[in-house]
Structures are given as structure tokens and as C-alpha cells.
Amino acid sequence: MQANSVKTVLLLGLLTGLLVMIGSALGGTGGMIIAFIFAIALNMGAWWFSDSIALKFSGAKEVSETEAPELHRMVAVLAERAKLPKPRVYMIDSPMPNAFATGRNPEKGVVAVTTGITQILTRDELSGVIAHELAHIKHRDTLISSIAATIGGAISMLADMAMWSMIFGGFGGGDDEDSPGGVAGGLLTLILAPIAALLIQMAISRSREFVADEGGARILGDPMPLANALEKLENWQHSRLAQPVHVNPATSHMYIVNPMMGGGLIGLFRTHPPTADRIARLRAMSEAVSWRGSRAEI
């Protein structure tokens, strides 16, 4: 928990520095001052409203117990086993099978699942996924993930602003000696902003997924349903070219399986560990410990 608090402060500091640097590149001293004021406001918003922003970015809608009784019951049973308040339940209308958790603390916890994941996973496998997300809430990973999503969205917005400013005539810096602005500043922003967004998301340690996998297995009382679910989700990812879906890049790192990243060289920049490694660890857990009698009844 303390390590995540330090990471959160570092991320907010990085955001401030990045926005000030971009503001200076686009508008000189004036742009730097405006960017600093904007950064302060964004930092405060990210701290207090990052979970709501992440849900909005993903298109998630809250569902009632009447609308999704089985899902609510599953979340309630597993939350009780995890000794957590029952999170709110959200659903994303998407064929992509995935899920994530958010909320700045356990009392504000949210579990969001796609319609796709409810269609391809068995009841046991979905329980494993929900338990994994509850482990994230229990370990307080969700605040830093939501803030990273907010930061990623802000950086993407700045890149879009820089692009349109270049198209419609510069940044207002003109030939002012105090402003490096102009085309050079715009090109620098367009190049660096997406890279910075990726690096910020990579700052969310890959190890948190391993810890959440283990925590989810212990909450459910069986590691195999989550291992089987991850295998299905990964297989769907490999076949997704046949059924493309839109995912906001700012929230991609929050999902149980990152929907944006592939293998090969690009795998070096994954925000998640390789799914095969996660499955292998869960199966090793299953073989090393007797889980008989510890399984949740859902």
C-alpha cells in the first residue's frame, strides 16, 4: 500500500512536469504557466475523480441487481470472502471478453465486466476473474491504475490539440524569442506524447498482476478457474483480428488482459506479464497446495 502511494505521488509529479514541458514547447512562458495551472487542476481531478473518468473512458454503465442478479451475487459472495465492502457492479457493452476494477479505496470499489466475458466464460471461470479484480481492490492497486488512465487520456488530448494547432496555423508562439513554439514544438509534442503515455502505463508494475492472480486464487479458494479463464481470454486476443473492437488506449492497462498489446518486439512494452507465465504460476499453485474444501460456494 505504501509503495503504491509513492508511485501515485511520482505519477502526479511526472504529469505536472510533462504538461509544463509541453506547454513551454507550444507557447513559451505563457504556455508554461497555463499548463502548470491546468496540471494542478488535473492532478486534483485525477486524485478525486479518476475512477469515474476511467469508467467513462471505457463506456461502462452501472447495472442493478435486477438487471444482473447472478453477477451481483457472485461479487457479493467473493467480496465477503475477501473481507471487502461489496463493490458497485458495472458492465461494458463490448464483445471483447475482459474486466477491470477501479475506485480510490475499497469503500469506493467498482468491478466492471464486458458483455463478451459473460458469454465465453463458465460460471467458475468468471468467478476467478471477479476474485482477481477484488484482489486488486484489496491491495489498493485501483487508485494508481485509474490515475494512470486519467494521465493517459490527458496526454492523448494534448497530442490531438497539438496536431490540430499545427493544421490550423501554429500555436500562437509566432516568432517570439521567448517561445520555441510553432511547428518544431508541435512535432515534438506529437512524437513524445504517445511515448510518454506508454511509459506512464508501464510504470504500473507488472508484478501487481501476479500478486492479484495469487490473491484472487486465495479469495476463490481455487487457482484453476482463473487459469482457465486467462487461457480463454488470451486465445480470444489472438483471434480478435476476425472481430475488431474499439478500446480506449488510456484504460487498456486496467483490464485483466491488456487488449492493446501483442507479442514479439512490442511485447517488451507490455503493461502486463505474458499471460502464459500467469497461467503457469496459477497451475503451479494448484499442484503445490491442496485446495479441497476451501472453494467458495457461488
Image (cartoon, rainbow, N blue to C red):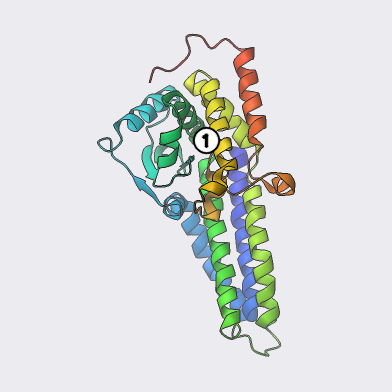
Q: Residue at x 65, y 41 (%)?
A: 205
**Residue 200 % position (x, y):** 64, 53
Residue 245 in view here: yes
Residue 33 in view here: no
Q: Is residue 69 left or right of residue 113?
A: left
Extreme-front residue of the structure: 242
170 w.r.t. 213: above or below? below
Which residue is denoted by mark 1 in the rendering? 136
Q: Is residue 112 left or right of residue 6?
A: left
Extreme-left residue of the structure: 66
Q: Residue at x 56, y 52 (%)?
A: 148
Q: Answer few, some or many: residues within 10 Å of disc 1's Cα (few below 14, many 20 plus, some between 14 and 19).
A: many
Q: Residue at x 61, y 80 (%)?
A: 166
| Quadrant housing residue 168 | bottom right
Q: Secondary structure at mark 1?
A: helix
81 w.r.t. 20: above or below? above
> Which amino acid is tagged 1?
His
**Residue 220 % position (x, y):** 48, 22
**Residue 138 % position (x, y):** 50, 32
**Residue 232 % position (x, y):** 54, 32
Classify the position of the N terminus by image quarter: top right
Q: How many marks?
A: 1
Q: Residue at x 63, y 34 (%)?
A: 275
182 w.r.t. 55: above or below? below
Q: Which one is nearer the viewer's eye here, 48 or 167?
A: 167
